[in-house]
Image (cartoon, grey):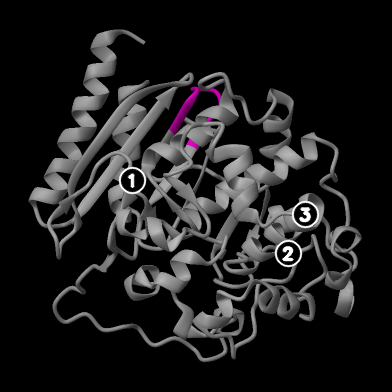
Amino acid sequence: MSKTQAVDVQDRVQKAINEMVDSGAERGLQVAVYLHGEQVVDAVAGIADPTTGRSYDSATPVYCYSVVKGAASTLMHMLVERGKFDYDTPVAKLWPEFGAEGKEKVTVRHVLNHTAGVPGIPLTTTIEDLCDWDKMCSAIAAEKPWWEPGTKIGYHAYTFGYITGEIIRRVTGKPIHDVLRDEISRPLGIDDELYFGMPASEQSRLAVLEDAPLPPGFQMPEMPPDLPMFRAAPMSLMPNAAFGNRPDTLAADIPAGGKTSARAIARMYAAMLGTVGGVRLLTQARLEEATRSPFSGTDEVFGMPTTWALGYAPGVPGVDAKERPTAYGIGGVGGSYAGFDIAGGIAFGFTKNRLDQDFRAASEITRTIFESLA
């Protein structure tokens, strides 16, 4: 990549996020892009904390919800690479209690590609319950599967994090926040930017989340009361700004989500694609296995078409999947997004602290990135 190209992509991204903030559409944004292991974009705009006026900087962590599922998936692949288990190992072999109620056939592969059939948590679950690791794992272990594992697909919004996290804990003897720090964050020099549970002493560095205002006259469409999504979790646990600003949820391991800067999650994905600062997280063969033969179908929870590889979803917003068939990513409630393109050697992160219901902003930024690096 020439210096002119590097300056161009940095300038185009910075201009785009400046306009989003200046227009009032966004409060604060970060974008980071790595190309073949080298950072080529480091862009920030706006305010991290409207109360104090604190500005965003490149190291500001943001609660990005499901975006950090990618880190849980990466840890799982690293443990497969070390021979701790394989993709077709039954989860009950590693976590015996999980085999209750007909779940003995659920494998690691089923968990990673959201076909395990265990997408729901008890409808009595509270936010305080989500912060109680043992209580949540016991509840999930006692659940009956919604379908025969491996035959259907449905987004495991909360359960993905607890199941992967408990597998990791059973195999390593350490909670997932320690394993993330020891295996990814610290080796890559991002241990103050990438977290599951975040110590209370560090939380003042976070961007403060806010809910985007609803358009004038907006009315929530009526939905049938028998929708499967209403069985998956209580509506009181739908992620929003209040949920993501609570000290207890920030401190807890709820690894279906997490806190990260754009730079940190992009650096992690870059270290999956190649070597970054002397660190490579996955071998090329492991990366290919993780993204081979995605499972597709109608999402049994949300009802729309969906596809998952082993922990990462094919395609990125704003980019034609036919043009970038080796691109994968994970977005989170509110509109943050991060991903990678194997063939292009591109890894990127986009974070925001104003929570929207779509990925319009992410689509504009990813389109700008991929067009600039074409």
Q: How far apart, in angstroms, are the residues tagged by discs 2 and 1?
A: 28 Å
- Residue that appears at 21% across and 52% down: 28
Q: Is residue 5 left or right of residue 125?
A: left
SS type, badge 1: helix
Camera-nearest residue between 205 and 271: 205
Residue nearest the viewer, comparing 125 with 329: 125
- Three-letter amino acid code of the residue under disc 2: Lys
Determine the residue located farthest toward the top in the rendered image: 2
The location of residue 1, given as percent across then percent down, is 36, 10
Q: On screen, 3 above or below 372?
A: above
Q: For mark 3, does the 10 Å Cα neighbourhood hold few (<14), some (14 to 19), or many (20 or more) residues?
A: few
Q: Secondary structure at mark 3?
A: loop
Q: Which residue is mark 1?
A: 363
Q: CA distance from mark 1 to mark 3?
A: 39 Å
Q: Is residue 127 magenta?
A: no
**Residue that label 2 marks:** 152
The residue sitting at 72% across, 80% down in the picture is 139
Mark 3 highlights which residue? 173
x and y percentages locating residue 343 in the rendered image: 54, 23
Question: Which of the two discs, 2 and 3, sits closer to the camera?
Answer: 3
In the rendered structure, which disc, 1 or 3, sits on the residue that comes first in sequence? 3
Range of magenta residues: 340-347
Q: Is residue 343 magenta?
A: yes
Q: Amino acid at mark 1?
A: Ser
Q: Which mark sits nearer the N-terminus, 2 or 1?
A: 2
Residue 325's spot in the image, x, y percent?
A: 55, 33
Where does the image place residue 247, in percent across and percent down from the top left?
40, 70
